[in-house]
């Protein structure tokens, strides 16, 4: 089903946007938050073994160290919405940039496990806040005809951040093998120092993000709604010209006049459906199991019998393969629409995850005597043939490509565009908090699922979640492509009286 307008020719942004260059600069500045998001989450794939040996961590403590990022993400997302609605999108993005830089420095110099956790939580605060604010900022500043493509730049930033840090990890690990011995007796350079460089390397992009967001404008929609109409008008004139600015301001003010601006308004019958859509997509984006791969990719490959060095190389290849996928979303999201891309992407996810589960199921098991807690015990390990390893890599790459062209970018775009303007920040916060709670569940549960039920059953669970998402997209999700934020908002307000919701495959 599509959200339509009674007069689709009255869109407030023309196809030719005079200030598109200025808009793209502002969007790219915000998209750097996505790069740091991806960098901070992807770095976990490289540090795990070294953290475990340096701090002498149990598997439970290691899982907590990786998942501790989400302990910051949840409050970051929870409180940033109301703060962004009150103080503005730009100011809060500046705060996020500072937190990213501080986290990068502190993560590189911890003397204890507790200090490392605190540094990771600070980084989580920045990720949680920016993952809510940046997509909203982009949605509010982008023309509706380009909003999907420009909104995809946030996910492009995430993908570049993940791929970039995978290669940084691989380069540091390779260089560290040449150093052999670290400062501590009996430990390699990578165990004592390499992981510090992995974590600290995010400081440079954090500084670039800070400088760019300082030069970017505030959201003109936020300015108009918060009684700073002239400031908003000045920005809109630079973006779309004087006539376009007048039309845009009139549209924003007219729509805002129908809102009360209270957070409780989100839970009224009028906005029940967008809230359900936002929460469902946020949670099931993570229940697809994407972070079991982002966080634990080298361990997944090592579980298939790949050596540690090759596992890091495979992980870097996997991260790089995702880059072309985001351009599929970029080129099609405003043409084909959100719904069809999500349907195709989630269908491919189901098939790829079932294939991963099948490969682990058919792999040979080798039982070898291993010393466990002082006793020699038979331990079963998986043994992949050379061809099976490459098939596994191919299936994981296909899954990552499908996620990157659909669930990855489109969830952020949809969450940022379906809620009313006065409570958009706080409403998006609710969905992003749910997303980070789901991320925490996946990050914390994957090592346990891997040990308790096995890799095959674990990826069947993720496949089932992707199948549920596919059905939700086909049966429930409406199409929002080509609509202004005000038209989408008006649709929710009038839907119950004029156009009762009926599911349709029509996009």
Image: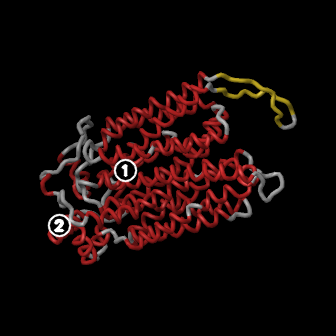
Q: Is residue 59 left or right of residue 414?
A: right
Labels 1 and 2 touching (C-beta < 8 A): no
Where does residue 316 sit, x and y in percent of width and height? 55, 45
Where does residue 224 sit, x and y in percent of width and height? 27, 72
Residue appearing at x 13%, y 57% in the figure: 10
Image quadrant holding the N terminus, namely top left
Q: Which residue in the structure is indicated by mark 2?
A: 244
| Image-quadrant location for residue 252 | bottom left
Q: Which residue in the structure is indicated by mark 1?
A: 275
Q: Nearer the viewer, mark 1 or mark 2?
A: 2
Badge 2, how many Cα within 10 Å: few under 14, some, many 20+?
Answer: many
Is residue 280 visible in the rendered image? The answer is no
Q: Is residue 475 above or below residue 84?
A: above
Q: What element does badge 2 sit on? A: helix
Badge 1, how many Cα within 10 Å: few under 14, some, many 20+?
Answer: many
Q: Looking at the image, which is closer to me, 136 or 299?
A: 299
Q: Is residue 170 above or below residue 390?
A: below
Q: Is residue 351 left or right of residue 201?
A: left
Q: Is residue 279 left or right of residue 331?
A: right
Where does residue 119 sit, x and y in percent of width and height? 63, 63
The outermost residue toward the right is: 374
The numbered mark at residue 229 is: none
User: Could you tell me how far apart the alpha carbons at marks 1 and 2 are, in whole angstroms?
Assistant: 31 Å
Is residue 130 visible in the rendered image? The answer is yes
| Image-quadrant location for residue 407 | top left
Earlier along the polypeptide chain: callout 1 or callout 2?
2
Q: Looking at the image, which is closer to me, 274 or 306?
A: 306
Where does residue 178 sit, x and y in percent of width and height? 71, 51
Image quadrant holding the C terminus, namely top left
Q: Looking at the image, which is closer to me, 286 or 397?
A: 397
Q: What element does badge 1 sit on? A: helix
């Amino acid at each position: 089903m599509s959200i339509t307008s009674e007069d689709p020719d009255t869109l407030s942004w023309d196809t030719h946007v005079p200030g598109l260059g200025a808009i793209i600069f502002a969007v790219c500045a915000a998209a750097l938050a996505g790069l740091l998001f991806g960098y901070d989450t992807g770095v976990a794939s490289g540090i795990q073994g070294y953290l475990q040996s340096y701090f002498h961590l149990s598997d439970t403590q290691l899982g907590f160290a990786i998942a501790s990022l989400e302990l910051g993400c949840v409050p970051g997302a929870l409180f940033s919405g109301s703060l962004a609605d009150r103080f503005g999108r730009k100011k809060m993005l500046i705060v996020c940039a500072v937190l990213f830089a501080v986290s990068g420095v502190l993560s590189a110099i911890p003397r204890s496990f507790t200090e490392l956790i605190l540094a990771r939580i600070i980084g989580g605060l920045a990720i949680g806040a920016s993952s809510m604010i940046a997509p909203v900022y982009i949605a509010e500043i982008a023309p509706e005809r380009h909003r999907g493509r420009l909104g995809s730049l946030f996910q492009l930033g995430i993908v570049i951040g993940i791929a970039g840090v995978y290669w940084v990890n691989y380069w540091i690990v390779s260089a560290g093998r040449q150093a052999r011995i670290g400062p501590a007796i009996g430990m390699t350079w990578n165990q004592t120092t390499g992981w510090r460089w992995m974590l600290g390397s995010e400081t440079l992009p954090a500084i670039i993000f800070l400088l760019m967001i300082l030069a970017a404008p505030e959201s003109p929609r936020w300015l108009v709604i918060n009684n700073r109409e002239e400031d908003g008008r000045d920005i809109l004139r630079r973006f779309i010209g004087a006539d376009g600015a007048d039309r845009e301001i009139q549209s924003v003010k007219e729509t805002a006049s129908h809102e009360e601006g209270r957070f409780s308004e989100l839970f009224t019958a009028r906005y029940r459906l967008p809230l359900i859509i936002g929460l469902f997509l946020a949670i099931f984006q993570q229940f697809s199991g994407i972070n079991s791969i982002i966080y634990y990719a080298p361990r997944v490959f090592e579980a298939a019998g790949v050596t540690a060095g090759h596992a890091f190389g495979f992980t870097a290849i996997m991260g790089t393969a995702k880059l072309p996928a985001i351009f599929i979303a970029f080129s099609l999201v405003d043409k084909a629409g959100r719904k069809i891309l999500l349907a195709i992407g989630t269908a491919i996810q189901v098939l790829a995850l079932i294939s991963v589960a099948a490969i682990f199921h058919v792999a040979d098991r080798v039982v070898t005597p291993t010393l466990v807690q002082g006793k020699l015990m038979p331990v079963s390990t998986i043994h992949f043939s050379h061809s099976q390893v490459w098939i596994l890599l191919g299936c994981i790459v296909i899954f990552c490509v499908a996620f990157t062209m659909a669930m990855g970018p489109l969830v952020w775009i949809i969450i940022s565009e379906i809620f009313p303007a006065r409570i958009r920040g706080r409403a998006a916060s609710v969905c992003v908090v749910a997303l980070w709670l789901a991320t925490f569940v996946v990050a914390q549960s994957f090592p346990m699922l891997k040990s308790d039920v096995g890799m095959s059953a674990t990826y069947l669970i993720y496949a089932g979640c992707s199948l549920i998402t596919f059905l939700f997209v086909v049966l429930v999700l409406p199409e929002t492509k080509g609509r202004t934020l005000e038209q989408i908002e008006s649709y929710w307000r009038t839907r119950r009286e004029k156009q009762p919701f009926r599911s349709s495959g029509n996009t």
